[in-house]
Amino acid sequence: MASQEMEQLVRRDYKEGFVTDIESDTVPPGLDENTIAFISNKKGEPEWMLEWRLQAYRQWLKMTPPSWAHLDYPPIDYQAISYYSAPKRPEDRPQSLDEVDPKLLETYEKLGIPLHERAALAGVAVDAVFDSVSVATTFKEKLHEAGVIFCSISEAIREYPELVRQYLGTVVPQGDNYFAALNSAVFTDGSFVFVPEGVTCPMELSTYFRINAANTGQFERTLIVCESRAQVSYLEGCTAPMRDENQLHAAVVELVALEDAYIKYSTVQNWYPGDEDGKGGIYNFVTKRGDCRGDRSRISWTQVETGSAITWKYPSCVLRGKHSIGEFYSVAVTNGRQQADTGTKMIHIGEGTRSYIVSKGISAGRANQSYRGLVKVGPRAKNARNFTQCDSLLIGDQCGAHTFPYQEIGNSTATVEHEATTSKIGEDQLFYCQSRGISEEDAVSMIVNGFCKDVFQELPMEFAVEAEALLSVTLEGAVG
Amino acid sequence: MSDVQSEVQTFLDRLAERNARRGEEPTWIAARRQAGAARFEAMGFPNRRVEAWKYTDVRAIARGDFALASDADFSPATAAALTLPIEAHRLTFVDGVFSAALSQLEGLPEGVQLLPLSRALEENHEAVGGPLGRLTGVEFSTFSALNTAFMEEGAVLRLAPGTVVEKPIVLQFLSRANEAPVMSHPRILVEAGGRSEATLIEHHVGEEGAANFTNLVEEVILDRNAILTHYKLQEAALADLHVASIHVEQARDSRYTSFNLNLGGGLVRTDLITDLNGQGADAHFYGLFYGQGRQHVDSHTLANHNAPHTTSNENYKGILDDRAHGVFNGKVVVKRDSQKIEGFQSNANLLLSDRAEIDAKPELEIYADDVKCSHGTTTGQLDEEAIYALRSRGIDRQTARGLLTLAFAGEVLELVDLDAISERVELAVAGKLPERFNLAGLVEAAVALGDE
């Protein structure tokens, strides 16, 4: 009884304005120009930003969702989504780890996630983020010394409007595609990184260490700019499975590399994939594109995709600068009823541009996944070079693996190669391992890790270790 | 009326004119014709937003106004020069109209039925009614619908079980340089009985300056253990428009080998599909295309592995010069539970000019796990080391490039059993090579070497 009274008291407090503006912290589901104006206002954005969002929204209205991907999902009701909600109040969250789904905890255990981080990841309302906050603060100082700007996109729009305005939307224009347009209209979170001329970012940047990053936004917008001769390595996501209330995620990531700049972007995506029947999983529709604007610039995408019910994601490189390089390393694992349609686009425009694509797909259970890639060589891209390797591994007879590589070549000096194989784990490989006393499950995990090695090598050290553990957890129960 | 509607209407008007002059027809044919027309009207011509036509613009066809040829007059001398120098059973069509004079149907072995579609319909239309349109229905594409609406002529080939046909069977399609362009909608039906074996050569050729539209639909049904080698040699004039939809159905242990050799035609689109429905069925798709000028050559292939223990193998090679545009789209689909599949696909392209373009898309769609499937595609230039090797033997650079280009094409041609065809194509390729390759004399030397 007492607790009920307490609760009522708490509620009454809100009505009386104990927390100011509580009414306006959420907007009802639905999307119109007012919602966008609300978001923009809430974020304290300048006028041009609102105008930019509205432009995107107006374009979005005229577009239709893409249907070409090899994915099967019911139509999304965009008016049923709430486009802005304030961070959860502590009392709405689980109060301790005991209230968290034991399955989730089991996974954390297997991944070897430190105890204090588990609570933060599960969204428990404890001061668990303290650790990362303090870490983040020391990091911030170091970055500041180097002249690197690393903050949330909202902060950047307020603090560095000129920089943001100069680059935002220049790689992924507002009307680029359906989900990019939606994101441009309503994005609420994301990161901004700016590395000035000649600076090599002193550490690997990660959203994980950014304050407030515990609640990753539903519509994230990331913009990374590297000036001439600057370098940065950026890590997105983390290996632990993340609980999220929002089913639809539509992020946009833009990378700009000027002359001799190098951007390395690594992603580990492990959103909730849904239950055994695929219900409730995250829909992940992401537009990622890097622009090698300067000569000899280089952009490298590395991704490990194990989560989400649906993944629709094609990190791309526009190789504009002469002798610029684009790279794409991907491991996609689908199990259960997951579906993934992912790949890359390499657009060769400048002379002597090179691109390298390694895609490893593992499909198990009743999952379906596709590699969809484009290599385009323009008429001016003399001596352009591409090599693509995409392999699929099938585990079980109910899954599917598909490859749809597009090649559009308009230059006689270009060399473009594509290779793809699809096979299952060899009986002889399994037998070999098992005859040496390795259990079937471990053997599968070993073979799969070997299969993905080319990509894991590209991951930053700490990610690589976690990724291997993650792979075996994801594929659990796929064999036998 | 929008452009799209008026484009479609032009064809529908032609159909109405034709129907008015047509006599009584069995009801099933009239019904199919109607279904075809309705489907065609509903679909309209594909634009480049349609995935299957992403790289091929058919406006040259859609905006055309093509009449239907009414006779099969063709100069015997010209025809003789165009005909493949090969001893064969032959059906000849001039702009889609059957020419008895240019055909060679005497001495057909027992068990072989080879006749023009019009006669097959006249004699016993019910026998054709069943299989015709079963594999390529009006739903397949705008062009198959259009073909169905206009179907009246073509070829029917039936092989009784166990029949082995020694001589190749040639279907010759001649295209005339008409004052106004014409269209034809040939329909080919092949029913190969169990254990039968034959070689079918489809030869598309014509007078220089011909600018006609051919819309071919071909259905090939192979019964158990049947073996068919199918050549499609496209040597039509550079303004000819050609769309072909070929659909093969393979029963247990049958073998189908296709050689799709594209040298001519302004716009050539081929859809080649095989359904591997019985265990042990085996399909081979080989292709060679050489594009120059503003030629557009589009090859779509699809191998449907519907049964376990089926194999497919594909190798397509393309050479593109000037402003030619090549498209290769190969697809292997492995159905659920179709285990123990082998599907291989390879495509290599050579660009000789900076304004030439190739769009390649090799696809795999796999729903079973015990499979071995792979595809590879490359586009590039001649191997510098190979050029160096030849130069170190005293061959100048240009000649070396010419020889290597020929050798590139040779990888497909060496699989051709019929010398008449492989030599003809090799010479044609050599003749097409840019002059800068300085080939005189060496071509013959190469051919002579091949003879030894």
Image (tube, helix red, strand yellow):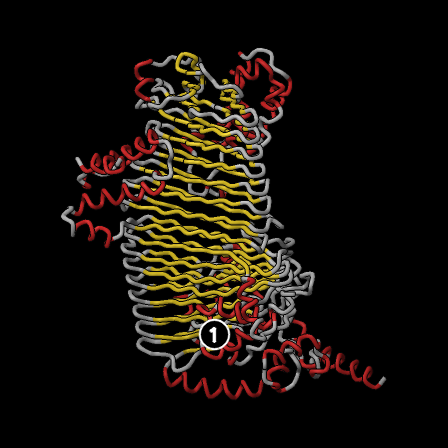
For the residue pair A91 and A478, the one nearer the viewer reads as A478
Residue found at the far left of this picture: B394
Q: How many marks?
A: 1
Task: Assess disc 1: are there few (<14), some (14-19) or many (≥20) residues with their C-alpha within 10 Å of its C-alpha.
Answer: many
For the residue pair A386 and A391, the one nearer the viewer reads as A391
**Quadrant of the image occupied by residue B452:** top left
Q: Position of residue A66 (x, y in %)?
A: 54, 51
Residue type of the residue flagged with mark 1: Leu
Residue annotated with mark 1: A235
Residue under the image location 35 percent in, 17 percent down: B179
**Quadrant of the image occupied by residue A229:** bottom left
* Secondary element at image label 1: strand
Q: Position of residue B64 (x, y in %)?
A: 42, 26
Residue found at the far right of this picture: A1
Q: Position of residue B274 (x, y in %)?
A: 52, 38
Which image quarter is the N terminus of chain A in? Answer: bottom right
